[in-house]
Each structure stands twice: as C-alpha cells, then as structure tokens.
C-alpha cells in the first residue's frame, strides 16, 4: 500500500527530517506505509512480516491483511488466523475490497478452477436476523462483525446479486450464518462479492454452484511496533588482550591456546 495523503506525508517529513515541506507542493509524495506509519506517540508501526499488507482505516487505525490457502470451514480458518496472531478479517473500504478480490484472483489461479471459488471473511449473522428471509433484516443489518476490529457497513453493500444475497439458505438443517467472498468467473463483474454461507461447510457439489467451495481465507491484525531482538543474549567469554589482559586459571578452558599458554607460563 502507498499512502498518498499529502497532509499525512507532510507531517511525517516534518517530524522525521526536521524540515518543512511546503503546503503548495505541486506533486504527491507517495511512500510505502511501513516507512511512515506512526503511532500516536511517534513509534513506527509495521505488519508482522512481508506476507501481510498494510491499510489505513478510519480513526488512524493501521490494519494488516494476509491471505492463506485452505479448504477449511470457518472455525478452522479462524484457528489458523489466531495462530498467526490475528483473526478473520472483513474489509472497510474500496481499497481493501479490491486488494482482497485481486489477491484471491491471483492465488486461485493455481487451483485451475473452471467457474470460481470462495474464501472466508469475518462476518456473522446479527442476533435478530436469524431464520428465513433474514427475519426481516435488510442487507446492511443482516450481518455484523464478530469483533470491533473491522467496522462500518461498507462491505454489506457488496452482496452478490446471483441469488439475492443474503438469502439465508438451509443445507442439512444449517442456515447461512457466516460470510464468504466469491469469485465467479462466468460473471466477472461480481468477483469479490460477498455471500452468506453455512459456517461448518467448506465444499459444495462441483457441478452445482462450485464457486461456493472454500479455497482460502483472509486474516487481519493491527499494525504494531517492530519486534526487537532479544537483548539478553549471553555473551561468550572473550580472552582478547584488550578486554581481559589476564585470564584466570579457572577460565583457561575458554581461552584461546595462545592465551592459555601465557597463563601457564605465568604460573610456572
């Protein structure tokens, strides 16, 4: 991600370079977010590693998103995300939506899918919207985020129109109470659209709506300070003449042969 928000970059330059960037700059300065992302106290914030992508959310929140392969149900996907230090993620804005859609399009190529496939996102049915026809709830209220890490209703404007989603269908007695994103190669304008899906499922019949089958999932986590190396690494004994001109006899086994020889000669 590149943050091309002039005021944000100007502030970063003013603080980091101790210079004033003119307000009337005739061009945008675009730098990778990991180079300029700062916490409120000025500390640099980064994603856990290069497998995560950083995004800026409302309220100066910095969010990292990671794709993972996996033909798994929602609970298994969430477990992997937690092992990676995150949770299943939704998307808050168009930039995140496009990134998730395009990443899935790229990653799914290796599966050679003729019609498309699905991927888990965060999102669970709202408590008052269970049952047939979403219990009267509309598209913006039928689902909610499982935690407060993803916010807003932007994602709920991206429902698939193939079958008037969310339609809360029933398979083997289970309603569609979780959320997936879809790639529908025969209807490319709907790639990335969301769909309600049974939480315990991961597969659908290959000849009937195969694009609902799960092939991956997206995790998210907040950006944080860089990990520091362990400052308590034990130092090895050093018998150099600069640091330890006289090696004690009881430590002779840790000294170089030359120093050990000197030690014995002094004791003779």
Image: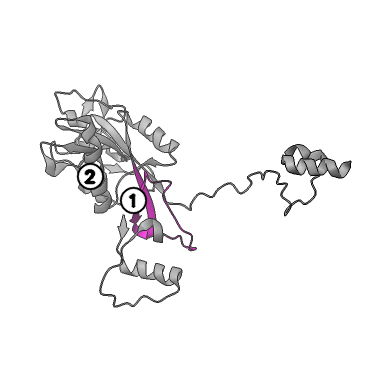
Q: Which one is nearer the viewer's eye here, 150 or 237?
A: 237
Q: Is residue 255 visible?
A: no
Give the x, y percent position of residue 197: 25, 32
Give the x, y percent position of residue 150: 35, 48
Sequence order check, earlier mark of 2 and 1: 2
Helix, strand or loop at label 2? It is: helix
10 Å crowding of disc 2: few (<14), some (14-19), many (20+): some
Q: Residue at x 36, y 67 (%)?
A: 9
Q: Residue at x 29, y 78 (%)?
A: 24
Q: Which mark lies nearer to you, 2 or 1?
A: 2
Q: Which residue is mark 1?
A: 151
Q: Residue furthest left?
A: 186
Above/below status of 136 relative to 170: below
Give the x, y percent position of residue 100: 26, 44
- Report if residue 14 lies within the magenta region: no
Q: What span is in magenta?
A: 38-66
Q: Where, by quadrant of the figure, is residue 263 drawn?
A: top right
168 vs 218, left or right, is left
Q: Is residue 160 visible?
A: yes
Q: Where, by quadrant of the figure, is residue 194 drawn?
A: top left
Helix, strand or loop at label 1? It is: loop
Q: Which mark is residue 102?
A: 2
Which corner quadrant holds the N terminus? bottom left
């Amino acid at each position: 991600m590149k943050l091309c928000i002039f005021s944000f970059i100007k502030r970063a330059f003013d603080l980091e370079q101790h210079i004033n960037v003119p307000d009337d700059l005739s061009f945008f300065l675009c730098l990778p977010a990991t180079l300029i992302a700062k916490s409120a106290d000025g500390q640099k914030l980064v994603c856990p590693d290069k497998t995560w992508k950083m995004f800026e959310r409302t309220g100066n929140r910095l969010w990292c998103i990671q794709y993972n392969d996996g033909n798994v149900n929602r609970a298994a996907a969430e477990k992997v995300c937690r092992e990676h230090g995150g949770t299943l993620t939704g998307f808050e804005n168009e930039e995140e939506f496009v990134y998730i859609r395009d990443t899935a399009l790229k990653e799914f190529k290796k599966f050679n899918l003729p019609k498309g496939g699905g991927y888990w996102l965060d999102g669970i049915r709202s408590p008052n919207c269970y049952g047939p026809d979403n219990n009267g709830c509309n598209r913006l209220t039928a689902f909610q985020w499982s935690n407060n890490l993803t916010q807003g209703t932007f994602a709920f404007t991206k429902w698939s129109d193939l079958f008037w989603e969310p339609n809360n269908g029933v398979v083997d007695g289970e309603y569609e109470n979780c959320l997936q994103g879809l790639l529908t190669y025969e209807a490319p304008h709907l790639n990335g659209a969301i769909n309600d899906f049974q939480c315990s499922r991961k597969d659908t019949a290959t000849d009937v709506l195969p694009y609902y089958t799960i092939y991956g999932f997206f995790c998210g986590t907040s950006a944080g300070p860089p990990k520091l190396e362990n400052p308590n690494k034990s130092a090895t004994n050093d018998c150099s003449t600069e640091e330890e001109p006289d090696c004690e006899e009881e430590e002779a086994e840790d000294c170089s042969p030359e120093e050990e020889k000197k030690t014995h000669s002094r004791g003779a």
